[in-house]
Image (cartoon, rainbow, N blue to C red):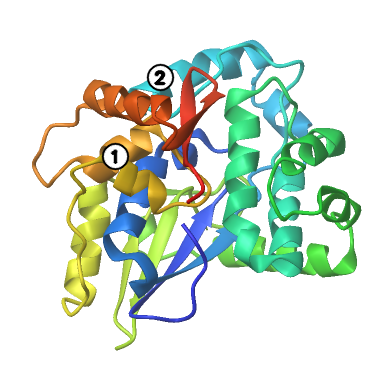
Amino acid sequence: MCNHLWMAIEITHFTDPGCPWAYSASPALAALDYRYGDQLSWRLVTIGLTERAQQYVDRGYTPTRAAQGQRRFARFGMPFSHEPKAAVAATARMCRAIVAARLQAPELEYAVFRALQFGQFTTPLVMDDDESIRTLLAAVEGIDADAIVDALDSEAVTAGYEADRAEARTADGGATHFQGKHASSDGPVRYTAPSLLLRAESGAELEAGGFQSLQVYDMAVANLDRSLRRRPAPEDPLEAVAAFSYGLTTAEVTEIMTPDLGVADPEAVEATLIEHAAAGRVTRRPLGDDALWIAAAA
């Protein structure tokens, strides 16, 4: 998923790298991006679920409870590490890192977001620690991790982060609120992660609040603009992986490859990806209890 210039539909994506629901929606979002590509213009808005880890502690969260809680998200297919961390983490520092990336290298904002998600859910790193953030972002090609960490408390990043938080807390009275997919844990009615606001060039808008299926997202696009080109599911997983420079998990590839009303077959997808890896066409990078598949350079 990339940030593009305005095209047919602009999507405001409210999310937070510390939310397991947002992480588990990655396959549906990848499939939506694959189907419509540059006809969608994505804008990421960070929610900032918590400023201090103590907020989670006060709600009864512990590293053990967090690790156990992640087990119920395994059914969505994204990689997890179920090892308890040393401590629970607030999400504000990660969100600030995303804003810093937006300011310094906007084309890599989503890659930074994904790296932070993987750090949260597939590593033992405590992700409100600046050194953990530095370690994760050092592996993102094109990102100056030191510059990102140094800017986390800068005036520009603070202003951008606070603007994101304020925008994410404007769900009162909207479709997300009506469906009960909102939250108000810190006062104002806010969007939960992930929530998508889709706006066509005509000005028509639709809202998909909270965790939704690919069918919901696709229906929203169909109702906003039927002049778009809709890419069919590929026959070979290599086509899916090659469309995303930052790589895809097995679940993401599987969602992209599953046709409408089809039955997902992650085992078959993974078997074919292993064949491609053996032939040098993709690289398999271990990630939690699964892998990230990256297309080999041409």
Relative vertical location of residue 75 with respect to residue 4 in this rendering, above or below: above
As shown in the figure, which amino acid type bears the numbered disc 1? Pro
30 versus 223 height, above or below: above
Amino acid on which disc 2 is placed = Arg
Left or right, 127 with reference to 83: right
Q: Is residue 123 above or below residue 110?
A: above
Where in the figure is residue 7, as x and y percent of width and height?
A: 39, 81
Q: Secondary structure at mark 2?
A: helix
Q: Residue 201 location, x and y as percent? A: 33, 86
Residue 296: percent from left, percent from top: 48, 42
**What residue is pinned by disc 1?**
237
Which residue carries the number 2 mark?
72
In the displayed structure, 272 sits above or below 211; it is above
* Residue 111 picture location, percent across and down: 59, 51
Out of 236 and 131, give the one closest to the viewer. 236
Q: Nearer the viewer, mark 2 or mark 1?
A: 1
* Residue 180 visible within the image: no
Q: Is 65 displayed left or right of 191 in the figure?
A: right
Which sits in the foreground, 174 or 102? 102
Label 1 residue SS: helix
Disc 2 residue crowd, few under 14, some 14–19, many 20+, Cα 10 Å: few
Residue beneath the point at 79% across and 33% down: 132
Is 76 displayed left or right of 135 in the figure?
Answer: left
| Location of residue 162 (image quadrant) | bottom right
